[in-house]
Image (spheres, coloured by chain):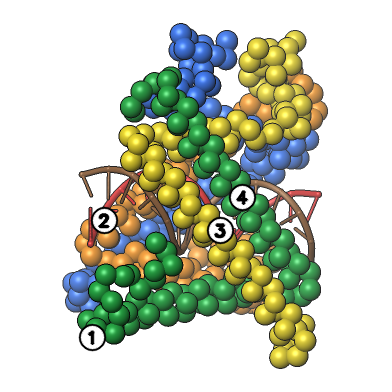
Chain colours: A orange, B blue, C yellow, D green, E red, F brown
Amino acid sequence: MPDVGGIAGERLRSLIERIERLEEEKRTLSADIKEVYAEAKGTGFDTKIMRQIIRIRRMDKDDVDEQETLLDIYKRALGMLPDTEPASAAAE
Amino acid sequence: MPDVGGIAGERLRSLIERIERLEEEKRTLSADIKEVYAEAKGTGFDTKIMRQIIRIRRMDKDDVDEQETLLDIYKRALGMLPDTEPASAAAE
Amino acid sequence: MPDVGGIAGERLRSLIERIERLEEEKRTLSADIKEVYAEAKGTGFDTKIMRQIIRIRRMDKDDVDEQETLLDIYKRALGMLPDTEPASAAAE
Amino acid sequence: MPDVGGIAGERLRSLIERIERLEEEKRTLSADIKEVYAEAKGTGFDTKIMRQIIRIRRMDKDDVDEQETLLDIYKRALGMLPDTEPASAAAE
DNA sequence: AACGTTGAAATAGTTC
DNA sequence: GAACTATTTCAACGTT
């Protein structure tokens, strides 16, 4: 650690508090998700199956994302995209 | 599932999309947190220790007071506390 | 898997059976614990509180000393501890 | 709770210590299982697959057990077993 | 007996 | 790629 108790202490505190805030937001979202599942269950849906569906869709999406990344690489190699911009900027 | 393909299908889709949106937000926050840790590391801090501090602070914050009263009765019965002092006095 | 159907098959079976035996023993112990709780409940004790006490005693026993030294440095930097005292002195 | 600090205290302590001993044994078994998995991994086996196999075998066994229970019920209904004894007399 | 809650197990992700 | 940590999932338990 660079320094104890001085400026570094303040810096560390700031970093930690930023993380704690972000984690708090994550926890809120987790609670929201839990609520939606509870609502779904109350309506008669099987949440275990829902979880599976969501997992599958996420994996499918990852595959698609991966494909798109590859596609961009090829496009760029072919001069179909500018060299300096990220691929996702193309949709802006 | 209450009904397949009709209104229930729409309802299910809606629930799943809500969850997916919330999970996407969570992923964004996770990425943010990761960034802060990377920044901290770049400044020379030990991220492993930082994680421990954050964990400890979180546990400290957890409110256990409401059940301590009952617990004290049992602890006292077990000799884990003196008969005459309140629980919180034990650490003084 | 290193080899299918030959020696590896026997090896695999042996490993799996060892695990299954250990898990069976675990299940027996869980049943024993459940019995003790049932007995306690029959005698008039509040098993929920008992579980809490057991959890607390387990946590108390956990050894965290080795990492406290490093932690103290950081905690001090965060103002969570006085500059001059060791961490362990705070509980004295 | 029946009584605080007197005989009940001793009784409670005894119950808790019995549970703690059983839980300690459980923890030992868990560690043993972990070791076996580590050994398996070291030999080149895929532990994730192993876990699946063990789960499947356990479920199959549960099915068999359930079948046997049903079988007993039918047997009893048919007078092939005495009315007053449970099928698994060994558990008495 | 269904519900929510909690604790353990498994998996995924991250770091070294 | 191996170990550790964090997250997620699954099962058990008490409760209503």
What is the CA distance from the residue labelled 3 to the residue labelled 2?
36 Å
Q: Is there one chain holding both mark 3 and mark 2?
A: no
Q: In this view, does B51 lie above or below A55?
A: above
Left or right: where A36 falls relative to C24: left
Labels 3 and 4 within one chain: no
Q: Percent x, y for residue A92?
A: 50, 61
Q: Residue at x 64, y 74 (%)?
A: C17
**Closest to the observer, C19 or A75:** C19
Q: What residue type is labelled 1?
A: Leu
- Mark linked to residue A39: 2
> Visible in this render: residue B46?
yes
Which label was assigned to residue D78? 1
Q: Is mark 3 on a helix, strand or loop?
A: helix
The secondary element bearing badge 2 is classed as: helix
Kind of residue sitting beneath label 3: Lys
**Crowd rating for badge 2 (residues with CA inside 10 Å; few <14, some 14–19, many 20+):** some
Residues at badges 1 and 4 in contact (C-beta under 8 Å)? no
Label 4 belongs to which residue?
D25
Disc nearer the start of the sequence (1/4):
4
Mark 1 or mark 3, whichever is nearer to me = 1
Q: Distance of mark 1 from mark 4, alpha carbons?
A: 43 Å
Q: Do labels 1 and 3 share a chain?
A: no
Quadrant of the image containing the N terminus of chain C: bottom right
Q: Mark 4 lies on which chain?
A: D
Quadrant for residue A45, please give it: bottom left
**Residue B83: where, in percent of width, then height?**
47, 12
Q: State the residue at coordinates (39%, 43%).
A: C39
Q: Do the residues labelled 3 and 4 touch (CB within 8 Å)?
A: no
Residue on which the image places disc 3: C26
In front: B74, or D41?
B74
Could you say whether the residue bearing mark 1 is in a helix, strand or loop?
Answer: loop
Spot occupied by residue D60 in the image (x, y as percentages of width and height): 47, 79
